[in-house]
């Protein structure tokens, strides 16, 4: 969360706007990847045989707006714990706590609408906690998550070049562990380790 820490809302009349780095990283590197995938981890192609992007700049901006207003948990009475309206203060301050979950500073959270994945738009004037929960649920519900995670976990745990059928079998377990549960990582790791391949 290095660039999410202290990410603040836009300031009218200045070039200050939410940092987009974490929004890009959480989608590109940690959940869905850059392009839409088939269940076997191969790229989906459009009518021109080109990969289909999973998101565009407007979605990055939407998630960047979701990830505003969060900073270390520390007493609100400590002025060093607040935002200074010029730039987020990243240096540790007396009283900060890196063990507790980050705290929302509502005055620095973007309150407007936010465009997310799959045509979802978050309504304006919601709390930062509610925006964050809906945004994380939006990412988790994306069909690429099972495909992306299954392929990358297989590469890290077993083989650098997993076969398409292997990725498909693991992704199927990610989507349904046999009890109807999606995202059961214990079942996914068992599927990766115990696959006949």
Image: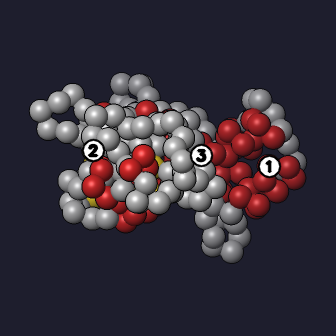
- Tag of residue 147: 3
Of the pair 162 and 56, the residue shown nearer to us: 56
Identify whether 129 is placed above or below 36.
below
Asked which secondary structure carries label 1, the reply is helix
Q: Which residue sits at x=42%, y=25%?
A: 49
- Of callouts 3 and 2, the N-terminal one: 2
As measured in the structure, the alpha-carbon distance from the residue carrying label 1 to the one carrying label 2 is: 42 Å
Q: Which residue sits at x=81%, y=34%?
A: 159
Q: Position of residue 111 (x, y in %)?
A: 23, 56
Of the pair 147 and 90, the residue shown nearer to us: 90
Looking at the rendered image, the disc whose residue lies closer to the viewer, 3 or 2, is 2
- Tag of residue 192: 1
Q: Position of residue 101 (x, y in %)?
A: 55, 58
The crowd level at tag 2 (other Cα within 10 Å; few <14, some 14-19, many 20+) is: many
Q: Position of residue 152 (x, y in %)?
A: 68, 38
The answer to whether residue 46 is left or right of residue 192 is left
As measured in the structure, the alpha-carbon distance from the residue carrying label 3 to the one carrying label 2 is: 33 Å
- Of callouts 1 and 2, the N-terminal one: 2
Looking at the rendered image, the disc whose residue lies closer to the viewer, 1 or 2, is 2
Quickly name the residue at label 2: 9
The crowd level at tag 3 (other Cα within 10 Å; few <14, some 14-19, many 20+) is: many
As measured in the structure, the alpha-carbon distance from the residue carrying label 3 to the one carrying label 1 is: 13 Å
Of the pair 150 and 3, the residue shown nearer to us: 3
Asked which secondary structure carries label 2, the reply is loop
Residue 43 visible in the snapshot: yes
Mark 1 touches mark 2? (CB < 8 Å): no
Q: Which residue sits at x=14%, y=38%?
A: 12
Residue 62 visible in the snapshot: no
């Amino acid at each position: 969360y290095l660039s999410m820490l202290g990410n603040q809302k836009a300031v009218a009349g200045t070039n200050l706007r939410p940092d987009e780095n974490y929004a890009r990283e959480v989608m590109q590197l940690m959940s869905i990847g850059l392009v839409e995938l088939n269940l076997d981890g191969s790229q989906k192609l459009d009518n021109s045989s080109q990969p289909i992007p999973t998101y565009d700049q407007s979605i990055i901006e939407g998630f960047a707006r979701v990830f505003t207003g969060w900073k270390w948990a520390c007493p609100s009475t400590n002025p060093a714990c607040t935002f200074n309206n010029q730039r987020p203060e990243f240096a540790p301050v007396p009283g900060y706590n890196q063990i507790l979950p980050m705290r929302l500073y509502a005055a620095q959270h973007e309150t407007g609408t936010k465009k997310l994945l799959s045509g979802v738009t978050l309504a304006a004037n919601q709390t930062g906690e509610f925006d964050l929960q809906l945004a994380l649920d939006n990412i988790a519900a994306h069909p690429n998550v099972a495909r992306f995670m299954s392929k990358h976990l297989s590469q890290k745990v077993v083989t650098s070049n997993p076969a398409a059928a292997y990725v498909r079998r693991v992704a199927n377990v990610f989507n349904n562990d046999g009890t109807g549960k999606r995202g059961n990582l214990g079942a996914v790791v068992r599927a990766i380790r115990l696959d006949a391949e």
